[in-house]
Structures are given as structure tokens and as C-alpha cells.
Image (cartoon, helix red, strand yellow):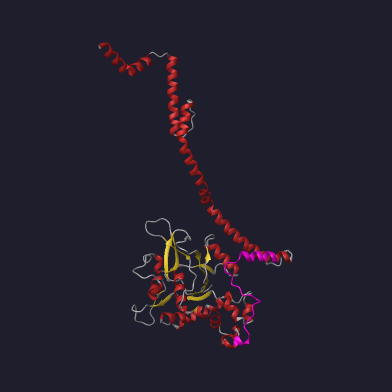
Amino acid sequence: MDGTAATHSDLAEAPNGTDAAATASLQPAELEELRRHVRQTTAAISDLLEGRPHPLDDEKAAHELAAALKPYVDRLYTLRRLLEPLERIRDNREQIRELQAEIAEDVAAVEDASSSDELPVDDELAAELRSEIAAVKRDRKIFVPDDEPEPGPESAAADPEARVPLAQRPLPERLRVIFGPRLVDLSRLGELLEAPFAESELAAATALLESVWQSLFDTPALRPHVEANRVAALRRAFADFALVYRPTQLPAPNGQDDRDEARVPCTLETLRDHFGERFMAGGAAWYSRLSFYDEPFASGHWALVDRQYLNVTFKRPKIRLMLYARANELSTELVRQKSALEEAFDRCVVDAALERQFFTNCNALTRTAYQQAQQKSKKQVYIYYKDEVIRISGKRGTPHWRPGRPRWPGVMPSVVFEPGG
């Protein structure tokens, strides 16, 4: 019994005692080999922690480790394949946008060259080139067909306005003949607001009409139709457009000031006071504390506004508007993206004048941007119709089309005629 117990005691103490005794009994060469092995193991562990590859001498251990790591390697490889195209798209996004702008500029340059008499090309090639350019420039071109017959004497008799040639009419009357109720001047705006504007304000707005006429109708494309008194054709060409005067001030809403001549700045706030039924009902608007809520127009001006929008799903508003200007032979400085105030004003007054919704519905991106407190990035304001009222929202980037929100992102073009422009 005692011998057995002693034997078990010795076995229990054997590892520590054996290791110490074995180490002490090693020869110098063997001790150096042990140290080398420890250094290699330490280096292998360090390489593994720092991500440096290190071969495994033990083939069995290498296979076991590879089998254990394979699911994680496969998962990482799959994630890498998914992320690579997204990274390429992100990295090349600005290059794509720059390319779009370059293409638009190239189209304009080729168009100028094709219309030049100095271009040494044959007539057939020039005609083909112009037809290709026309196909590219289909961004809402104002077009009056030359071969469309005008109404006969019977129709002219039924329409007294068509009897007197346009060129012999006063300028405001010419525009009213062409646009009809879609001409919203200060007189019509005063009727809508039930508060007439002063004669001095009416005269200042009328004085700006000369630049409107010269830019739109006194052009090589439309002047022949005006001289030929093709009223019906001009009306059809501008059927999707309204001509609106945007003033810097509006009459004070009822109850704010008893004076007839009282005026308030034309802002989103005063628009809501005058046209409250055209905005979403309820308490204070979410944007009432933001700076653009009470920013007025810088100056009174005329604007030719389009009923239809330019889709900006694949092209930025700047490029769309540049193509729009080129298509209609207008200065790119005149064709602008609307501000939130301009978009809301146009919808209020034109819809009220026509007693119906005039503009095609979309997520209309405006040039107005705002930055909320404690947020680094800015949001862009966009406007749309919902439940037959005007809605104003904000978003980073461009709103996307989806089945639950079937409104394409678009920009509503506006041709602006300002004093001194």
C-alpha cells in the first residue's frame, strides 16, 4: 500500500519535476535548438496576429486549420465580390456626371458647327447630322409646324381676336391672345387676391414685356409665324406654357392691415396666408422655422413656366436645363431651376387662374437647400401635389421613383426675364 501511494505521488509530481530536470540535463546544443523552436513559435504567433502569412510545418495541422477557416474565407470572398461593383460605381459617379456634361457640350458644339456655312460637308451629310442632333435635343422644344394649315375665314369670323394681326396689337394684348388665361399679370393677380396693385407696379411689370417678346417671339424660328398672323399655331405651340409675373410684394392678407395700399413681402409665409386652401391644412409647417420660409423674391420678374417636367432620374437638373435652353435657342442664363418660393408661387397663381391643377405632378426638385441644426449635410427642397394640395418636403439627394410613391424626380423649367436682363 505504501509503495503504491508513493508511486502515485511521484507520478503526480512528475511533469514539473521532469521538465525542470530535463531542461537542466540538456546539452548546450539541445538547449539552443529548444530556444530556436521557441523563437520560431513566437514569431509565428506574432505573424498571425499582425496578418503576415507564415507557413505551417505540420501538414496535418495545416489541413485542419484550412478546413476550419474555409467558411470564413468563402464568406469574405463573396462580400468582396458584392462590394467591388458598388465601390466602382461610387468612385466613378463624378466621372459619369462630368461625362454627361461633356456630352451635352459636345452636342452643342456639333450643332453650332453643323449650322455654320463654313463647314465643308455635303448637303446630305449635313442634313443627316442635323436630324441626329434633333433626336438628341427633344427636351421640350417649342415647335410650330410649318405645314399646319391655319383656320379658314369661317373660323376667323368666329374668333374676333384672330382678325387683327398680332403685329398691329399692343404688346400685352399680343401675349394675351397667345396665352389666354395662362397669362397671369399683375391685373389678373390682383383679381385673384381681391386687392388690385398700384398703377406704378402695373407699369413696371408692363415695361418688362418687351424683353419677353424679343426673347420668345422676335426670333428666326417664331418671327415668320407672327408676321403671318398664325395665331392658332402659336397658341398650340405654347399650350403647355404659362406666362407669370412674380412680384416682390403682395397685398397684406385680410385682418393684418386695414390700409388698402398695405403690402407684405411675397414669401412662402404670405403665400400660405393668401392661398391657404392650396397647402396642407394643419398647424405650423415643418419648414416655418427655416430661413427660406420668409425669403422674398429679389426683384419682380416675368417667368415662362412649363407645365411638364424634365426627368432627372439619369441626368442632373443642370444638364437637363442646358439641353432645354439649347433646344429652344435660349440663353442658358435665362433657363433656371426654380426655387421653392417660385415653384409654390407658380402653382398657386396658375392653378387659381385656371381653376384646375395645371402642372404635371412629379417630385419637383428646387434649387432651395437648407441645413438643420446639428446636421453637417444639406437637404434639398422638393415640391409635389398630394391629395390635390401642395406638399413641400426635404431630402438628401434626389427622390427616387417607387411603386408606393409614383412620382418621377423632375425639374420644372422656368425662363426668367428680370429687370436689366
Q: Is residue 153 magenta?
A: yes
* Nearer to me, 410 or 2: 2
- Residue furthest left as drawn: 2
x then y, percent, for residue 283: 33, 69
Answer with left or right where residue 179 lies relative to residue 223: left
Determine if residue 163 is in view.
Answer: no
**Residue 397 appears at what percent x and percent y?**
47, 58
Q: Does residue 135 belong to the magenta stretch?
A: yes
Quadrant (top left/top right/bottom left/bottom right) for the C terminus: bottom right
Q: Quadrant of the N terminus?
A: top left
Residue at the image point whose x is 51% and y is 78% from the top: 182
Snapshot quadrant of residue 329: bottom right
Q: Residue furthest top?
A: 3
- Residue at image location 46% in from the left, 38% down from the top: 71
Residue 83 rendering spot, x and y as whole percentages: 50, 46
Front-most of residues 13 and 321: 13
Looking at the rendering, the stretch of residues picked out in magenta corresponds to: 127-156
Asked whether residue 99 appears in the rendered view, the answer is yes
Count of numbered badges drawn on the protein: 0
As drawn, the residue found furthest toward the front would be 1
On screen, 7 above or below 309? above
- Give percent across and percent down for residue 155: 60, 85
Q: Is residue 373 left or right of residue 303?
A: left
